[in-house]
């Protein structure tokens, strides 16, 4: 539940569909009973993605679109 709340904060603009997609992507390798360490690692991955990866990708897309 805490992990979903974290994702909900990051995917607020995308709504429920964005939340479900992000959760599905981040939990796809968990299996049926993920360990506490796996869940903690996933929380760190989520934070890293939304703090560093997404802003960089957002900045790069306009440049790639205008590249010849």
Image: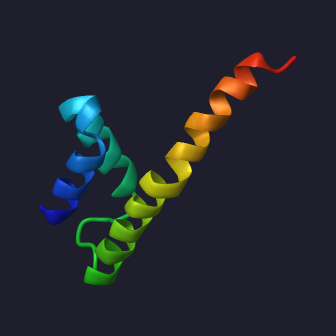
Quarter the N terminus occupies: bottom left
Residue, far right: 68
Numbered circles on residues, count: 0
Residue 11 falls in which quadrant of the image?
A: top left
Residue at the spot 39% in from the left edge and 70% down from the top edge: 44
Residue at the spot 53% in from the left edge and 56% down from the top edge: 52
Residue at the spot 26% in from the left edge and 81% down from the top edge: 36
Left or right placement of residue 26 versus residue 23 in this view:
right
Residue 56 falls in which quadrant of the image?
A: top right
Left or right placement of residue 52 versus residue 31 in this view:
right
Residues 51 and 37: in front is 51
26 over 12 or under it: above or below? below
13 over 53 or under it: above or below? above
Q: Residue 50's spot in the image, x, y percent?
A: 43, 52
Quarter the C terminus occupies: top right
Q: Residue 58's spot in the image, x, y percent?
A: 56, 35
Q: Residue 9's spot in the image, x, y percent?
A: 23, 48
Residues 54 and 39: in front is 54
Residue at the spot 59% in from the left edge and 40% down from the top edge: 57
Coloring basis for residues: rainbow
Residue, far left: 1
61 over 1 or under it: above or below? above
């Amino acid at each position: 539940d805490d992990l979903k709340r974290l994702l909900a904060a990051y995917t607020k603009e995308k709504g429920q569909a964005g939340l479900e997609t992000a959760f599905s992507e981040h939990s796809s390798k968990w299996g049926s009973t993920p360990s506490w360490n796996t869940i903690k690692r996933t929380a760190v991955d989520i934070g890293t993605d939304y703090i560093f990866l997404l802003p960089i990708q957002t900045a790069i897309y306009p440049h790639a679109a205008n590249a010849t």
